[in-house]
Image: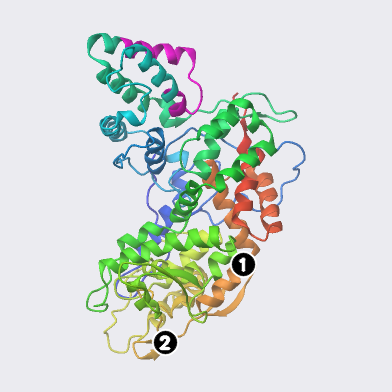
Amino acid sequence: MLGGTLVLGCSGGGGGNDDDTATAASTEGPGTATDVATTTPTTSEGTGVDPTEGAPADCEGPLDPGPAPLRRLTHTQYNNTVRDLFPGVTLPPQTISVDPKVNGFENNADVQTPSALLIEQYQRAALAVTEAAWASPEAFLPCAADGGGEPQQCGHTFILDFGARAFRRPMTADEEAAFLGFFDQQLAETNFTVALQLTTQALLQSPAFLYFLEFGGEPVEGGEAVALTGHELAARLSYFLWDSMPDAQLFAAATAGDLDTVEGLAAEAMRMLGDSKARGALVNFHRQWFDFDGVALINPDPATYPNYTPELRTAMRAELDRFVESTLFEGPGTFASLLTSTETDVDATLAALYGVDAPPPGEWAPVSLDPAQRSGILTRAGFLARTAHAVHPSPVKRGVFVLARLLCVPPAPPPANVNTNPPDEGEPGQPKTNRERYAKHTAQADCASCHTTIDGVGFGFEHYDALGRWRDLDNGEPVDASGELVGTDVDGAFDGAVELSQKLATSTQAHDCVVSQVYRYALGRGTTAADLCSLGDLRAQFAESSGDIHALLLAVVTSDAFRTRKEAP
């Protein structure tokens, strides 16, 4: 069920067309054209119409939790989980295929299709993990490395504990009999170490470990949903807020029934948000939402940018993680602050790009950037370089990104047989500036309908070159960074990306889009009309909190959609 690639946007410019960018935005962005091919037919995402827009007729009583497709661990969650299963042991990262991105995220159940390659990767990972773990067996075994005087008892004790933690719930009687019996058989034929390693490998390849198996418990009164069990909720909670398995305290809370109430669930969520693992998980969410990984693919033209180095690219990427973490955990913690903060961390390479004092080589230091030039994540070098070509910046890439990922209104696919070749920069009589080249989009009738909106946003970034450096001149001409938002709740002209970011920071539509993104990520699926009531309630709570991201996370985990699932037919 891999989704096809549909090109987004009409044409390109500045040394190459923008079809590649539009394609990337389409396959990875939220609610894009490709989502039609990669999500279930129950959604209308990708058509330019959000199925969750509008007011539902009746939201009284238990809310419809929407679909609950079978999900499995992402590559990040797999590596985090085996790390936490073997505390005190250093494990090498394992190669697990990244699933196709839907709505920008890597955890969408609709495209998590098994393959022979994936099965082989799980097998190899299980072998590699156990081999590395048994280099330090004293860190996790309840007995000596050879099993001591009671190898069978030691093996059984480890398997029951490890199996419950790996499956994120107590093992069933049938599971206990199967895995303990397998261990006993191997112990009789080989030795303690081999038998326990083989059993551990079997546990790590079990569907109960690789998948989130949710059946639910008691029916919800007055609705068609069942409440998730405490252990199912603990797993949803830990993989949403930590990207990893429940810890002992969360496991105990699930066993005691503390997660069966909204108050108990909220209390555990608040505790978890204070843990360092929450920082990594929230950064990982933003990595996917804002496509931080795209920074690794930038390839600036060396003749145009002789000062570019791989070290600068590495610093650009690291800055984005640092910015998100510091803004959300040490700073205001709001969506608006992500778009308006002038605070960041720099090393010597980034300091030179931003024109601020440099810290000692190899060190990072907090700085305040010029508020006339920088405002939040959309004006950071990593984002700007990721949305540019080798020579020139791309208003199309930048405009599509803002529309799709921050406003949840991705442009529609282009008409067929559109000429995407821009005029050569060096042709006599051709436009001199980057903006003038891209202005040809709106001069073509079949492109103007989309590019008036796309370029109206993208032109606001013209003060930044393909490395994200500030510029007042483009090819000797004054930069025109005026733009216009069309079809939003903050429509109107703006001058530059700083003003654009400030407008988006006050936009109800942008805040509602944030709710949709977090909701999709939390549930590992796209949104449908069944989510109207849940999203409406979450959007109201997010607005009431003035866009506080932590408050939104708590609202999501205590929502009916998170705590229940539809009853199986």
Whether the magenta-drawn stretch holds residue 181 is answered as yes
**Residue drawn 54% across the image and 64% down it:** 338
Task: Give the foreground label among 1 and 2.
Answer: 2
Kindly identify the amino acid type of the residue bearing the numbered disc 1.
Thr
| Nearer to the camera, 79 or 142 | 142
Q: Position of residue 19 (x, y in %)?
A: 36, 63
Q: Position of residue 443 (x, y in %)?
A: 45, 78
Residue tagged by mark 1? 488
Query: Mark 1 or mark 2, which has the lower sequence index?
Result: 2
Q: Is residue 414 in view from this perspective?
A: no
**Residue drawn 30% across the image and 16% down it:** 148
Question: Where does the magenta region start and end?
Answer: 163-184
Kindly identify the amino acid type of the residue bearing the numbered disc 2.
Asp
In this rendering, the answer to whether 306 lies above or below 510 is below
Q: Quadrant of the N terminus?
A: top left
Secondary structure at numbered mark 1: loop
**Residue drawn 52% across the image and 43% down it:** 240
